Structure formats: C-alpha cells, structure tokens
Image (cartoon, rainbow, N blue to C red):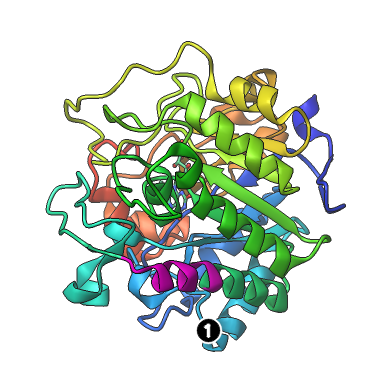
Amino acid sequence: MVVWSPFRFNCGREMANRFAIAPLTTDSSHEDGTATEDEFEFVRRRAAGGFGATISSAAYVEQDGRSWQGIGAAHDGHLSSLQRLAEAMRAAGGLAILQIYDGGRIAKPELIGEQCLRAPSAVASLRPGARTPRAMTADEVAGLIASFREAAALARKAGFDGVEIHGANHYAVHQFFSPRANHRVDNWGGTLARRMNFPLAVAQAVRDALGPTLIAGFRVTPFEAEPDGYTLEDSKLLCNELAKLNLDYISVSLDDYRKSQPVGETRVYDGPVEKRPPPAESPITAFARVIAGRSAVMASGGIKTCIDAEGAIGMGADLVAVGRAVVVDPEWLAKVRSKREASILAGLPKNEREIAGALSIPPRMVEYLLSRPGWIPRL
Ligand SMILES: Cc1cc2nc3c(=O)[nH]c(=O)nc-3n(C[C@H](O)[C@H](O)[C@H](O)COP(=O)(O)O)c2cc1C
C-alpha cells in the first residue's frame, strides 16, 4: 500500500511512510513561550508510533502575534526548548518539522495587550468577541516577514528537518491573502496578485533561511467558506506561485477531506453558520493538478483509518496529516499498522482527569479541546 511506502522531498529528506502528525496546539506552554514537560510528553508518546514526520504545534514568530499560550520561535531564548522539542518529535526516527505562525487580527488581546493587536487592515474577525485591530504599517509588514525568516533560521539551528509556514486557518498569512481581511491598497493588497505578495514573501524568506537541504512547507486553507472570501480558483493561483519557489510541500487544511469543507472563521462546530457550498472539484485533486509534482501535496481533515488515508492519496495527495485521531489515541498509528483498527479509541473518556493522565494530554489542552463543543468526539 502506498501509505506505507517512503516519500522523498525535493530537498532530499525522506519520510519513512506517508503519515504525519498534524500540527496540534496544546495551549500549555510556559508564559515565555518555552515548552512544558507535559508538551514534550504529549509529542514524544505520539511520535513514538512511527509517523514519517511530526509537525509541531504552531510557534509564534512575534510576541504581538500570539493567539494562545503556545511555543515561540521568536528569539534565542526559545532555542533550547526548540531543540528538546525536535528530539521528542524524532522519538521513533521520523522527521521533525516546526510550524510557525502569526495571529494577526486573531491574536489574543489578553496575552499581548489590547493596543498591540495589528493585522493587514483594521477589520475585525467574525469570531465571537473579536476586537478591531489596527492596520500594520509597511515597516511592520517588512518586520513580520523578517520575523518569519528569523524563526526559520532558529528552527534550523535547533536541528529541525524543516519548517511549515502556517498560511491557513485565518491567521496572519491567510489574512493577507483574504479579501475579507485585507483592504490594503499598497504592495500588500488591493488586487489578487498583490494579496499573494505577503504569503510569497514569507515563503521566499523561509526558503532562504533554510537553504536547499531542509524541508519548506506551506499550509493553506483552500478557499474561504464565508461569502465574499477567496475562492479555490484564487488559491490554485497562489499554489502555482508557491510551487515556483521550490517548496517541498503544500498542506491542504480541511475539516473533512471528503466533504472538502475548510474550518470556518467563527470556529462554531455545532451551530448553524452561513457557509458557501464546497466547490465541485476536491481541493486536494485541484492542487495536485496545479502543482503537478513540483511540490508534494499533504491532505488533512477527518483521517481516522487506513482507508481514509488511502482515499486522500487516491484524490491526489502524496502525504496525509492526522490530527484529532492521534490526540484521542496516542497509539493510533501503531494500531493502524498492525491492523488493530477496531481497538482505536473513538473519543475522549467522559472523565476529564482520565483524559489528561491516561492519554498524556496536558490539562490545559484538555480544557481547550472541550471548550469547543463538537470539535472532538467524547466516549
Ligand atoms: C487541538 C488542536 C490543535 C490544533 N492546532 C493547530 C495548529 O497549531 N496549527 C494548524 O495548522 N492546525 C492546527 N489544528 C488543526 C489540525 O492540524 C487539523 O488540520 C484538523 O484538526 C483537521 O484534521 P483532523 O480531522 O485529523 O483533526 C489543530 C487541531 C486541533 C484538534
């Protein structure tokens, strides 16, 4: 089966199989952005299952872009924590990839201070309780690109095999590409071509910092579910430009790869939300066609069994990233590999103390998981 075969990236690094652990924020780091022992254990236990790669939770590149209390890759003070994280992620010899992000307008005011909220434009997000950010100056935009470059350089120093730019899920890179969030009229907005400039500049900066032998990936939300958002046709053009930068992979962020629906900005999982219907063509297939082998395509969203993974690969993906299934069952991949899928845990136990202890999930992450009804199944 393809899923168990190795995969070689453009840069020459190889995954032993096609499974990656998806980036999973724990909301459990120290205030200074260094990882806690609970976080190392969360990652180590899951990576030990034998994944071809583990992608870290998103690390902030600037203090003012923090959206939760997670890890940082913002300065040398984060180096030793990142080194330990890379080691934990390699628990079974898989590749270690650091995801980096900036929250832009959905940074958390309680963490950064109300006045520090900055974004492409002074437009509030649709999330409940969202505050209106101020528009970044051109110098701040250039500074943020430099922060992504420096974070990638730090990842390299810490011994990661590569970096994934978080260009999805409504964070700052996504915001620059979105006509809903970006109303700028300078080099960074106004037309579709100019809305691509920030994601492309970040990708180029990260590629430059990593050099040709480390993995550079980019995660994208393939279209915005909200009316007036960017379309699949728009993001296909972006992917085509990203592939020209010799990226190793493009990761397609979906809530469910079969339904082709991305995570909405409001993040309401169980309520009625106005959403555009998904396009007729699967975003995975569409991206695979546009990218045409120049970069790998990684699919994610609702992969719970080997058949799901094969299904995503059948749609054109080269790799799959698994999120909630491996949160709920740390031994998920070992069970899939040994054909014990019937014994995979299907949801989090009812008892919250049991969740943290038995499953090695940091207690604050348990709260975070349970704070969004319908996000994660319960037994
Ligand atoms: C607890 C949790 C934290 C997440 N944190 C991140 C993150 O830091 N970066 C990211 O790109 N996606 C993040 N995601 C999204 C997942 O990577 C994945 O795309 C999503 O959960 C859908 O895949 P799944 O159905 O396999 O969970 C997170 C998801 C969960 C459940």
* Residue 96: in magenta span: no
Under mark 1, the amino acid is His
Q: Quadrant of the N terminus?
A: top right
* Residue 61 appears anywhere in the view: no
Within-10-Å neighbours for mark 1: few <14, some 14–19, many 20+: some
Residue most extreme to the bottom: 77
Q: Which element type, helix, strand or loop, lies under badge 1?
A: loop
Q: Is residue 219 left or right of residue 144?
A: right
Could you tell me residue 199's position as x and y percent?
53, 51
- Decide: is 3 above or below 154: above
Q: Quadrant of the C terminus?
A: top left
Residue most extreme to the left: 129
- Residue occupying the point 82% across, 60% down: 212
Residue most extreme to the top: 280
What predominant SS class does the magenta segment belong to? helix
* Residue 337 appears anywhere in the view: yes
Residue most extreme to the front: 186
**Viewer-proximal residue among 107 and 344:** 107
Could you tell me residue 128's position as x and y percent?
14, 48
**Viewer-proximal residue among 146 and 214:** 146
Q: Name the residue beneath numbered marker 1.
A: 75
**Viewer-proximal residue among 169 and 1:** 169
The span picked out in magenta is 136-146
Confirm or reject: label 1 Cβ below 8 Å from ligand 1. no
The number of numbered discs placed on residues in the rendered structure image is: 1
Q: Is residue 45 left or right of residue 93?
A: left
Q: Is residue 83 left or right of residue 106?
A: right
- Residue occupying the point 50% across, 78% down: 74
Could you tell me residue 177's position as x and y percent?
43, 44
Could you tell me residue 115's position as x and y percent?
19, 75
- Decide: is 82 above or below 134: below
- Residue occupying the point 59% across, 25% down: 284
